[in-house]
Image (tube, coloured by chain):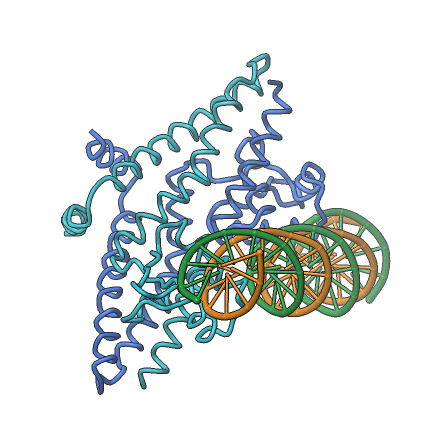
Chain colours: A cyan, B blue, C orange, D green
Amino acid sequence: MTLKEGKEKFIQSWGALGSSWGINRTMAQIHALLLISPEALSAEEIMEELQISRGNANMNIRALIDWGLVYKELKPGERKEFFVAEKDMWEVVKNIIIQRKKRELEPMLRVLDEISSVNPESEEAEEFIEVIREIKLFSNKADSTLDTLVKSDSNWFVGTFMKMIK
Amino acid sequence: MTLKEGKEKFIQSWGALGSSWGINRTMAQIHALLLISPEALSAEEIMEELQISRGNANMNIRALIDWGLVYKELKPGERKEFFVAEKDMWEVVKNIIIQRKKRELEPMLRVLDEISSVNPESEEAEEFIEVIREIKLFSNKADSTLDTLVKSDSNWFVGTFMKMIK
DNA sequence: GCGAAGTTTCAAAAAGTACTGAATCGACAA
DNA sequence: TTGTCGATTCAGTACTTTTTGAAACTTCGC
């Protein structure tokens, strides 16, 4: 396989993976492109490589910066902005966990709390409350597990899980 | 809050959560409805409750069964099929992990393997191969961690992670 | 203040995804 | 074999999300 083919294949696949990870195709492709680019790239270069419009490039670069997956890099003397990807996979996954937890798990916990206030005026209501209570228990556990995971560093992750596997 | 409001709120929120989990809104809503339903429900009843068409209900119920989140229940003497949700949250999450691993992580591992065969004929190609190698390492680790997680039972999960948190 | 180089915004268009409802299929009882 | 009840399929439609591209904005040097 040639370098060019390899790069293209990687960008395509990373894009596809991203779309099932709350990161849209283009966003993931930009991330992939930056991951395998030894140099920081400008918006122009990204547009060129991926054949996308200026607006699209801009929006998705901003989003990647928001998620903490890409950094802005200013070169002295240059007015243009350049971008580099976070290359440590553990950091990448960690940032995704942080964002998705905030966007998905935390709102769900709030809703579960609200729902718990249904008054148990009937058999059915009591059963409902019980189901919700169990879901809440599980979600809280997941929430704190993720917190711990995120606070820990890469080596810890490798170490603990390698032990688990054995 | 009344029981009715609580149920509606839960179905809505579970639906929203699902859509960012590779499970579409309706699929997740059906799952939510079944989760909080003390009795098995028929397709008709699901259509009625969620105001969706027969085709939509059918498709999404099949998908839920595929994912292992819902079971078919045949009542003796009844020709109709009834459905119940998997109510153990650990089983639910486990099944989602299994499915998504199969659909997302495993194809990515295959692509990474293919890509590794780029021939290192230049400085740039060597750097590319190195980046891919690191991603592969991380992905393999994630893959086996998930395998272990999935093989373990609920108590193990609770136990291990509770220890981690302290 | 003005123009050049670059960035951001956003309404409209395109692409992608999910839903409907009617036709079809299949199993069973009569 | 036929009629009935329910499950399944799928082409067309509706809805959602993403992308475009042009205009507006910002920053800076002159």
* Residue A11 visible in the current orientation: yes
* Residue B58 visible in the current orientation: no
Residue A38, quarter of the rendered image:
bottom left
Q: Residue furthest top?
A: A121
Residue B64, given in percent of the width and then of the height, sits at: 53, 49
Q: Is residue A162 left or right of residue B44?
A: left
| Residue located 26% across and 70% down the image | B132
Does residue C10 lie above or below A14 as drawn?
above
- How many tags in the picture? 0
| Residue located 42% across and 42% down the image | B92
Residue D17, quarter of the rendered image:
bottom right
Does residue B10 lie above or below D22 as drawn?
above
Residue C23, given in percent of the width and then of the height, sits at: 81, 65
Query: Observer-nearest residue: B143 or D1?
Result: B143
> Looking at the rendering, in which quadrant would you find the C terminus of chain B?
top left
> Looking at the rendering, in which quadrant would you find the N terminus of chain B?
top right
Q: Is residue B96 left or right of residue A36?
A: right
Q: Is residue A125 left or right of residue A61?
A: right
Residue A44, given in percent of the width and then of the height, sits at: 45, 70
Query: Observer-nearest residue: D7 or C26?
Result: D7
Query: Observer-nearest residue: A79 or B118?
Result: A79
| Residue located 31% across and 71% down the image | A37
Residue A95, given in percent of the width and then of the height, sits at: 33, 48
